[in-house]
Amino acid sequence: MANAHPCRLSTMTDTAKHHPSACRCCYIFLSLLIIVNMCRISTHALSIPLTQSLKTASGLPISRYGLGGAARSTQPASLPALYLERLLNSNDDDDDDDDGNRYKNGAPFLFYYNPHRYPDFMSGVKQLCSPEESSTVDRSDLFIAGGGTDRSAHQLDQRLSDCLEYSGGTYLDCFVLEYVCPEELAVDAAAPWNPDPMMRLQPHPDLAAAIEHVRRWVDEGKVRYVGISTHSHVVGAVLARESDVDALMIRYNLSHKDAAEEVTFPAARENGKPVIAFTTTRWNSLQGDGTYDAPSTADCLSFVLGNRSCPPVEAVLHSARDEDELNEAMEGIRMGLNEDADAKWRTYGEVIEESNTDYFDEYPEERYLKASAA
């Protein structure tokens, strides 16, 4: 009504004076209009900047919010389709089809570890990727990532075969060598002296061979990106320098942030490596149990997309346990928290990090590292 013609406003005012029932009708109409617009705004909550590096085979930037499989819960088969629907419905109606892009807020990004760990969720992923079963989306407009903890060539081949079974059978967008540990690094005896010990580290020959094996899949068209995941920020910083590694999957959340911000993220920025953040809710423990003031799921996810982490963080992974949690996350996620909320929840996370009573932090000593003096 802010842009309504003044003659129309005066007419409505005059009508209200002489016809109270008309006034009530106008009031009801305006109230409904406000509610409709509020609903429209909530569907646009995912309107945040698109990724710069990670893209689908068709060239679409992926969604900043990635949906992952969760072994700790039973996710329904309907979840991947709902995720796709939410991405499509979050488009601004005024912009639809102007340039033929259906994904104004990024293309769907789905991730899973061993696909046999959550059959219901994976059946939903498989349906999206199968042209015989899904007429809603083209496979080339999806970004599907999977991987394995194996390092031998034979085991890696089997894991890729498992991943391809659920991602359309032709290619996987990103294969992730999962859970790389500090023990898989080695000192480069030929490296020149450097005051930063991390600069003298390199992948152990077994890890280097695994990275090379996955890189060959890229050359063969079976995989598009080579990724690594780790809970160690020393590992993240070292592998950020590897030219055959395209992306890093790094643990980052309110209670596990110092080493990421001091060690991994600077290395990733320097080497132009996009980061996918995972365990962003600390296995859904950061939100609390409702008996004390705690961040929401959307707060946890939004923190990860703050200005201390983006870049290099391109996307945040979240393993929504059900449709309600998925809707809550996608409605509330935003590009960082405001200054007060960021400070509040950082302090909250530090209390949890100091105690580490659940031993979530596998390398607690790393939180005191600095990029130039590890």
Image (cartoon, rainbow, N blue to C red):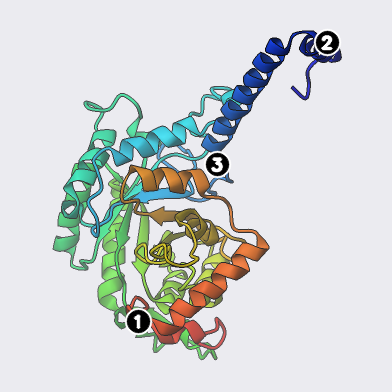
Instruction: Name the residue carrying label 2.
Output: 14
Q: Is residue 369 left or right of residue 15?
A: left
Nearer to us in this view, 230 or 246:
230
Q: Is any atom of residue 329 visible in this view?
A: yes
Give the image location of residue 204, x and y in percent: 30, 79
Q: Amino acid at mark 3?
A: Ala
Q: Residue at x 43, y 76 (%)?
A: 233
Which amino acid does the dot numbered 2 rest on? Asp
**Mark 1, secondary structure of its residue:** loop
Q: How many angstroms separate mark 3 from mark 1 (CA)? A: 35 Å
The disc placed on residue 159 is: none
Q: Which residue is mark 3?
A: 45
In front here: 123 or 42?
42
Residue 194 screen position, x and y as percent: 53, 89
Going from N to C along the chain, the mark reached first, 2 or 1, is 2
Name which of mark 3 and mark 1 comes first in the sequence: 3
Quarter of the image containing the N terminus?
top right
Q: Is residue 260 visible?
A: no
Residue 225 image position (x, y, % from top left): 38, 53
The amino acid beneath tag 1 is Thr
In whole angstroms, how far apart are the C-alphas of marks 2 and 1? 68 Å
Residue placed under numbered mark 1 in the picture: 357
Residue at position x 45%, y 83% in the image: 354
How many residues crowd around disc 3 within 10 Å: few (fewer than 14), some, or many (20 or more)?
A: some
Of 208 and 11, which appears nearest the observer? 11
Quarter where residue 216 is shown? bottom left
Spatial separation of the CA atoms under disc 2 and disc 3: 38 Å
